Amino acid sequence: MTRLLGSTRDAQLAAGLLVVLLGTWELLARLGVLTPETAPAPSVIASAGSDLVAGGLFFDVRITLTYVLVAFVLALVLGVGLGLLLSSWPLVAQVSVGFLTFLLSVPKSLFLPLFILVIGIGGDQKVAFGAFSSFAVVVMATMVGIASVDANLVTMARSQGARRREVFLKIYLRSMTPTLLEAARIAMILNITGVLIAEMYVSRQGLGYLVNLYGQTFQVAPLLAVIAVITVIGIALNELLRWCERRQDRWREGI
Amino acid sequence: MTIPQLNAERTRTDEAVIRVTGIQHSYRTARGPVPALENVDLSAGPKRFVSIVGPSGCGKSTLLMILAGLVTPTAGERYVAGAKVTGPQPDQVAVAFQDACLLPWRSALDNVAFPLELRKDPRAEREARARELLEKVGLAGYADRYPRELSGGMRQRVAVARALIQRPAVLLMDEPFGALDEQTRMDMGEELLRLWDEIHNTVIFVTHNLAEAVYLSDEVIVMAARPGRVVERVLIDLPRPRPVEITETEKFLHLRNRLWRLIRSQE
């Protein structure tokens, strides 16, 4: 996997580009080229952001972040569990991979009304929908991961006296770790999307709710401020998981 | 008269460190069972170096996996140190596989220490032993390298070190040098003999290279295919230690040619 921001020089370039973009935007806004109602200047967005923080933005951040993380753990545990279960029988595995591929291509948001009918509009619905959005990816990755475990390594471990549990932990799970971490990263993105969509659809709190609120009331500066906060959270979670990937990937990349 | 004979028989079988008798094995395929091994008996005494040779498809690797307890034969019995057993016996039997079978996410040191980790030995102890064995196979400076950073020959040495860390009474080797080039293969053979002089356990070595079999072994078991069976047991009465030059002596060539003729005659 190539790293987008591999070296310090790349990072500096990216930061420089961001500054130039924001500067140009600010300039165009001040010169009156951009409409202040739909494209407010970065400085205006920033001050709207600080107003939001003073008004209790972190409460909503905490709500959404909690939903996202609970949904993530749920999707991971249930997804890996089901993936392992389905892989126990070759025929079942074969059939379910086809089914999962189909499921992956269906837009999950279509099921949102059904979730509201069945679970309601509370926090559990946001968590359930978030987990549902990423679940299939984790199941799929688990099954692909299991299928790619080198059978010779299993034989080797058995010859040295490894029991079922040790074979599972030290050979299967370890072989699958890169695939699972990559799936976790994609699952996290899908989770965030799922939770936010559920919040935008029906809710009284959370970042998705704020996006919907400011959009509906035509308050673009706070709307963009919330979007910026969501972007930062998304990048932070993604980078955290990438860091985990790199940490355990050292044996593949060499020194 | 019968009693001494019986005793003689018992002594002989008790002496075998590893023994299989009446092995039948067939593979299940869509077109019905295919016989892989038919009525195979094999035993190896203590401190014997035994090679198994034969054409591809004679079931020599399957036989080794049966000896290792990793494949359960359709019929037949297996004895390790006189006891009838099934399944792997990691305290007595170690296996070195065809491709080194190292765990790619572990350093050479952690790969060698793996069997001791499974035995739940304390970390310090197993690392000290692993270092000792890496040194023995000439890889003292490579403890922290990952398999992908090692050459084919080095990987195979790590695999041998990992097998030896089990202190096995029997070491089973499945064409361990098969994937190496000819020069490395000879070097590895020479090194294996040097190591074996020190450890002096029982080795059963599967190969299709007849010169390698003669050079290493005390006895060579010749197998034939369709169905897999033992054709003959050839004693290799060359003196030890064996310098590489021994491969040019008349006796060596004579033995190798004899093996070659035995295999040819079965085709």
Image (cartoon, coloured by chain):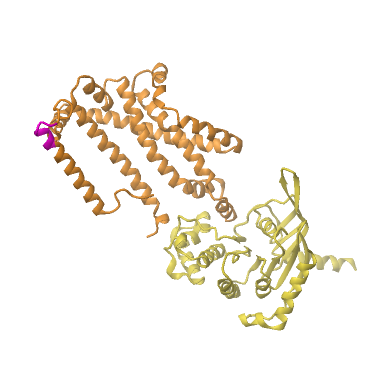
Chain colours: A orange, B yellow
* A57 or A30, nearer to the observer: A30
Quarter of the image with the N terminus of chain B is: bottom right
Query: In the rendered image, is residue B11 in sight?
Result: no
Please provide percent x and percent y for residue B169. 63, 65
* B121 or A103, nearer to the observer: A103
* A50 or A16, nearer to the observer: A16
In the image, residue A129 sits, relative to residue B97, either above or below, namely: above
Magenta residues, start to end: A26-33
Q: Quadrant of residue A68?
A: top left
Total marks drawn?
A: 0
In the image, residue B74 sits, relative to residue A37, either above or below, namely: below
Quarter of the image with the C terminus of chain B is: bottom right
In the image, residue B50 sits, relative to residue B21, either above or below, namely: below
Q: Give the farthest residue toward the front.
A: A33
In this rendering, would B130 be left or right of B180? left
Please provide percent x and percent y for residue A200. 30, 23
Q: Residue at x 23, y 47 (%)?
A: A14
Please provide percent x and percent y for residue B127. 45, 62
In this rendering, would B246 be left or right of B134? right
Q: Give the farthest residue toward the right.
A: B1
Instruction: Confirm whether the magenta stretch covers residue A28.
Output: yes
Q: Residue at x 69, y 54 (%)?
A: B85
In the image, residue B89 sits, relative to residue A205, either above or below, namely: below
Q: Residue at x 47, y 69 (%)?
A: B139
Instruction: Confirm whether the magenta stretch covers residue B191.
Output: no
Please provide percent x and percent y for residue A69. 34, 34
In this rendering, would B207 be left or right of A243? right
Q: What secondary structure is the magenta-colored segment mainly? A: helix
In this rendering, would A53 be left or right of A196? left
Query: In the rendered image, is residue A32 in sight?
Result: yes
